[in-house]
Image (spheres, helix red, strand yellow):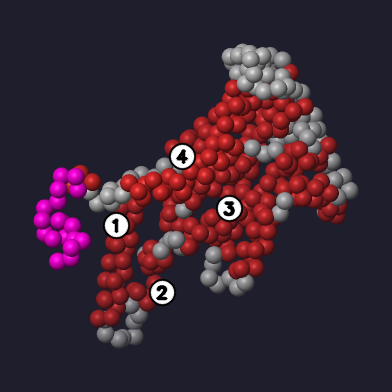
Amino acid sequence: MSLLATPRDAGYPAGPDQARQGPGRGIRRGEAVAGWLFTLPVLVILGVFLLVPVLMALWVSFSDWSGRGSPLSSGVGFVGFDNYAAVTTGGGLAERDFGIALRNNAWYVLLVVPLQTALALFLAVLVNRAVLRGRGIFRTAFYFPSVTSSVAITVLWLFLFSTSGVVNTVLARLGIAGPNWFNEPSGVLHNLLRTLGVQSGPDALTQHDFLGVTWWDWLAGPSVAMSAFVLMAIFTTSGTFMLLFIAGLQNITPEVEEAAMVDGANGWQRFWRITLPQLRPTLFTVLTLGLIGCWQVFDQIYTGTQGGPGKTTLTPAYLSYQSAFLSQEWGQGAAIAFILFVIIVLLTILQRFVLRESPDMPRKARRQAKQRARRRAAAAAAAASTPDSGQTSPTEDAR
């Protein structure tokens, strides 16, 4: 027996301290200290450059800081929720601007997140097919817009969607008069209703408002200018999410899909019943990242339209910048930022609840896969034991 052997290795019963520790808990104190020392630089950097600014911004949202001097000086007063009330219930221009920004961003999220997720999943399924040649070229081509600077893509989009740009030129060749994309403030849904003869909404929608914006204006849809930004977001972000879906598809074991093919499931049934349920964690990640990115859209608006035309591309992120750095309303700008943070957190929690996975779902899927494997093995054994004749076996017919 080795001199370094523990009582458990020697066959003796473990002591009370070792019994309490259990397997995997016997981390030495020196190793724990070394772990904290290795992570200390990162914690210090995050604390100084992330946690402290966030806490200071939170204090600014509750203060009357004018932007001069330190927000922690004695001359800065505490105003409570006045800044939050000014942008939510104040009844003035600040409340209306915040309502317009929320409406614009809400339509942006409702259109971009589903479309970019569906396109990314479609591209991932297409590129992941083994029969496709040159898959690496297609992956690189689809992913390339995601690594390009958003400012460069925005400038390119301004040229493409200008009055005499490529998009309107192509539409003119097809006999369609293209709009003045980035100078058209009208809502898409309102334009569609005007073509059907509806010029104004009912009194129930036009006489009542939320955050200074009537319900009829809330239902106007994205403006023509914001629609161009929607197309740009789908074009630039689908490649990144495509890679996430490809990683999820490659983690799916082929045995389950092969068993479904033996059971007679077609491609569409295999996708909805087998592939998509197993992509639930990846789908949650893609939807969460897309949701956060869409609510934080800023650089495209700053580079492209700066909220115009008619504030129809104004977003809460850009409004926060505008209120703080341009209007010198630092408290309101910080309050808008934290309201936006609360919206993102609540929507993420709701999304997590909707896409939650039942605890029995993995166990049920494994049980069904084993049952299919047994049926496939039984069918193969029956086919092997059947003597050769002029008739084909059911297994061969299925193949």
Task: Say if the magenta span includes residue 11.
Answer: yes
Residue marked by disc 1 = 367
Residue marked by disc 3 = 241
Q: Residue at x 48, y 35 (%)?
A: 350
Secondary structure under badge 4? helix
Of tags 2 and 3, which is closer to the observer? 3
Outermost residue, front side: 3
x and y percentages locating residue 163 in the rendered image? 87, 45
Task: Specify the label residue 399 is tagged with.
Answer: 2
Q: Residue at x 61, y 68 (%)?
A: 136
Q: Tag 2: residue type?
A: Arg
The rendered magenta stretch, by its main secondary structure, is classed as loop
Please report the bounds of the magenta region as a residue range: 1-18
How many C-alpha atoms fall within 10 Å of the one at disc 4: few (<14), some, or many (≥20)?
A: some
Q: Distance of mark 4 from mark 3, alpha carbons? A: 18 Å
Of tags 3 and 1, which is closer to the observer? 3
Image: 213 above or below 383: above
Q: Distance of mark 3 from mark 1, alpha carbons? A: 31 Å
Where residue 227 sits, quadrant-wise, is top right
Q: Which of marks 4 and 1 is nearer the N terminus?
A: 4
Outermost residue, left side: 12
Q: Which of marks 3 and 1 is nearer the N terminus?
A: 3
Q: Which of marks 2 and 1 is nearer the N terminus?
A: 1
Residue marked by disc 4 = 352
Of tags 4 and 2, which is closer to the observer? 4
- Contact (Cβ within 8 Å) of mark 4 with mark 1: no
Q: Which of marks 4 and 3 is nearer the N terminus?
A: 3
Q: Which residue is drawn at 78% across and 35% down?
A: 306
Secondary structure under badge 2? loop
Left or right of residue 48: residue 186? right
Of tags 4 and 1, which is closer to the observer? 4
Q: Tag 4: residue type?
A: Arg
